[in-house]
Structures are given as structure tokens and as C-alpha cells.
Amino acid sequence: MSMTLAQLRAFLRTLELGTFTRAAEELDVSQASVSELVSRLEEHLETRLFVRGGRRMVPTAAAEELRTYALRALQAAEDANHAMQALRSLEAGVARFGVLRNANYYGLTRLVETFHARHPQVRIHMVGVNSHDVAQAVESGHLEAGIVVLPVGSEDLEYEPLFRDEVLFATAHEGPANGSATTKDLDTAGLVLYDAQSGWADPTRRQLLDRAQQAGHALEPLIEVEQVESALTLVANGTGATVVSDSLRRAGRIPDGVEVYPFEPPLLETLALVRRKDTVVSRATTEMMSLVREFIHGPRHHR
């Protein structure tokens, strides 16, 4: 006789909850079934996994040792089931995908319209947040994949660079003397930054901070807001300076009176597809990733 997934589930729930009764309630089976499953597992392993200690089942050293392997076995079974589901045709399901806030300026709308036209029965769950938050959601399993600006720094994620775009200095006041900006110019003008919630975890902010530190000066925001459009409105009204992706300039979204300048050396951000390592991505999300490669475009594809 070999151990079964049902036995491992009963074992793990008992280990977590402390009694056969509570494990049975969570698994929606009888208490006797859980007890029998654990007993058969003990017989197979020829060792005790629990001893009674008052009202709770006390795990033995063998139970603690088995925990890791049981979790791995159940995860492998879940991954296998997920893989089989992913092979089915795209007749239903959900494509769960994360994008950076300004993804519309890179062709996101056309991507979504194309996906829906090809697979009208598949629901689309598109989350637009900061790259740092997208990476965390993918790492935790709340999203299957996404688009981020690098670096986001996780060894559990797999990255596929798509293209690089330039970050520009934006101001309504007199521009840098030689036509190229530095982080010192930002600090002097009064820095207005967006993505307030993510703060310095934002990848582009981290690049700015690293560059300022290398130049030997601090970089403290005068004002922080959540949306880049809000930051640009403040700058257009004469408050400070900010940074913007060149995608906004190409899309004609820089307000009247605001001029943009390159940094010296150029400040570049890399956009990339991100997914967890060693996990199966659903068919719907796999299709979404393919469309990202087709429709999300950088500077050279601008018309």
C-alpha cells in the first residue's frame, strides 16, 4: 500500500488544526474518515505521527519531518492539475495579469481589445499598479504574470526584457543650462514625484536615488502624489519639476508649457514580462503574454 493524496491532506489539516474533528470540518468529511486516513498513513510509514495531549493531537518528530514532503506532494498535484487545465481550449476562465500604470502609452488598450475579440468567453482581470506591487502580486500568486519596470529584485521571479525607454526631466521653468539634466537639477527645482504609495520601492525612483547618492547629494521630494498626470499638472502650474517616461511625450500627454529634457548620462528603464519560476501559467495568461510581445511596443515602434 502506498500513501495517497487524501491521506496527506488529512495529515496536514490535523497537523495544522490539532484535532481530527476540526480537520474533518475543514475537509467536509466525517471525523472517522480523517482518523482512518491518518491511521493508514501511519501504518504505511510504520511510525506514529500524533499522540494525544489533552484535547489536541500532539505531532511527533516524524510528523514534523513529513510536513515538508507532504506540502510538496500536494503542490505538485495542484500544479499538474493546473497544467492539464491550461491545455484546454480558451472557452472560459480568467486571464489574471498585472501592468504598470502607464501601460496604456505602450499599447495596452489594443492588446486587451485583441484578446477579447479572439477569446470573448475569457474574463480579463487586468491590475494596473506600480511595478513593485505587480512583482509582489506575481510572487505571492495573486497574479500569474505581468509587465514591470526593472529592477524589482526577487529570486523567485523570471524576467523577460521587452525594451528600454528613456526617463526625462520635466519642468515649466527654465531648463538645464546645457540641455541635459542631473538629479541635482531635480533637487534644486523642487522634486514632485508620483507613485506615492510605493515610495522608494518604485524601480525608477530607486534609479534616481542611486544616481543622486553617487553624486553625493540627497534627493527629497517636495510633493508626492499617486498619478503621473497629477504630478505633471502641478509642474505645469509652476510647482517644481518631475520625471516622466518618454512614452508620455510620444503620446502627446505633456501639458502645454512643460518642457522635457534628457538626463546626462541617459536614464533608461527596462520594461519586462515577469512570472514566477517553475510554475505553470494558465492557457489564458500564456495567450496574454504572447499578445504583450506582439502589441506592447517601445520607442522604435512609435508612429
Image (cartoon, rainbow, N blue to C red):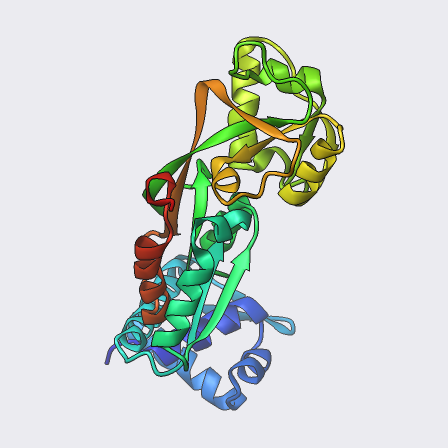
Residue 199 visible to the viewer: yes
Write the residue at 50% across / 73% down.
13
**Image quadrant containing the N terminus:** bottom left
> As drawn, is 208 to the left or to the right of 63?
right
Q: Is residue 101 above or below residue 188?
A: below
The percent coordinates of residue 105 (x first, y second) are 49, 49
- Nearer-the-camera pick, 260 or 149: 260
Residue 278 visible to the viewer: no
Q: Is residue 247 above or below residue 179?
A: below
| Residue 206 lies in quadrant | top right
| Residue 160 lies in quadrant | top left
Q: How many discs mark residues in the rendered view?
A: 0
Write the residue at 51% across / 38% down.
249
Write the residue at 57% across / 31% down.
205
Q: Is residue 69 above or below residue 215?
A: below
Write the residue at 38% across / 46% down.
303
The percent coordinates of residue 238 (x first, y second) are 75, 28
